[in-house]
Amino acid sequence: MPIRLVVLDRDGVINEDSDAFVKSSDEWRPLPGSIDAIGRLSAAGFTVAVATNQSGIGRGLFGLDELEAMHAMLRSLAEAAGGRIDRIVFCPHAPDDGCDCRKPKSGLFEQLALHYGITLAGVPAIGDSRRDLEAAAAVGAWPILVRTGKGRKTENELDGPLAGVDVFDNLAAAADHVIAKTGG
């Protein structure tokens, strides 16, 4: 049976975002309904992956231990809600490092495609920023915007090939749409 993958951004989609960066598990707070949405996606047969820029590492604001503690909390909460985060890929680089993994580049998505041995054509990819949508579109995934995090601002700036993307109030609404539309 082929894998049913969904790719989520982290900050602003699953948890609260911060202009000062989310630097520790003490600062990591899930958005209302987001953890239950992960549970519903898992129950519907989706493999849930997270692709997230974490430039706070490259900026020296926190380290890999803190990042792993945040991700351990995310995984634990998802499991308590009947969900599972199968894989988390992240870009640790600062914006000027010239890497190929920092969204809007598609490197994180390419890592997931390679790991799962699939193309990402049509794979739902839920984010709150233009760079999330651009990275998803670059690999043929299905870009979906949520209004949480930076999403309301992003929604007002959608144009060109991103003008017609699906937009939902939050991850819970986006997940329900993905499940309904894909026969989950």
Image (spheres, grey):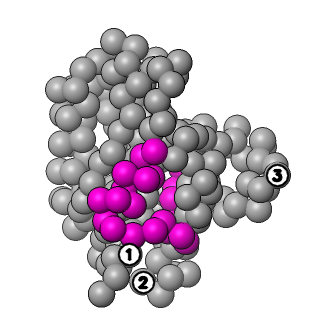
* Residue that numbered label 1 is attached to: 4
User: Does the segment drawn in magenta span residue 100?
Assistant: no
* Contact between labelled residues 2 and 1, with CB atoms less than 8 Å apart: yes
Q: Quadrant of residue 149?
A: top right
Residue 160: mark: 3
- State the residue at coordinates (21%, 51%): 75
Say which quarter of the image contains residue 58.
top left
Q: Position of residue 159 (x, y in %)?
A: 81, 49
Q: Could you tell whether 73 is left or right of 30 in the image?
A: left
Determine whether 89 is above or below 38 in the image.
Answer: above
Give the residue at x 33% y 68%: 117
- Answer whether labels 1 and 3 touch (C-beta < 8 Å): no
Residue 9, position as x, y percentages in the image: 45, 47
Q: Secondary structure at mark 2?
A: loop
- Residues 59 and 17: in front is 59
Q: Give the residue furthest to the right.
A: 160
Q: Position of residue 12 (x, y in %)?
A: 49, 40
Q: Quadrant of the C terminus?
A: bottom left
Mark 2 surroundings: few (<14), some (14-19) or many (≥20) residues within 10 A: some
Q: Nearest to the eye among marks 2 and 3: give it.
A: 3
Picture residue at 52% right of the left edge, 47% below the top: 106
Q: Amino acid at mark 2?
A: Gly
Give the residues in magenta. Answer: 107-128
Residue type pointed to by label 3: Gly
**Residue at label 2?**
184
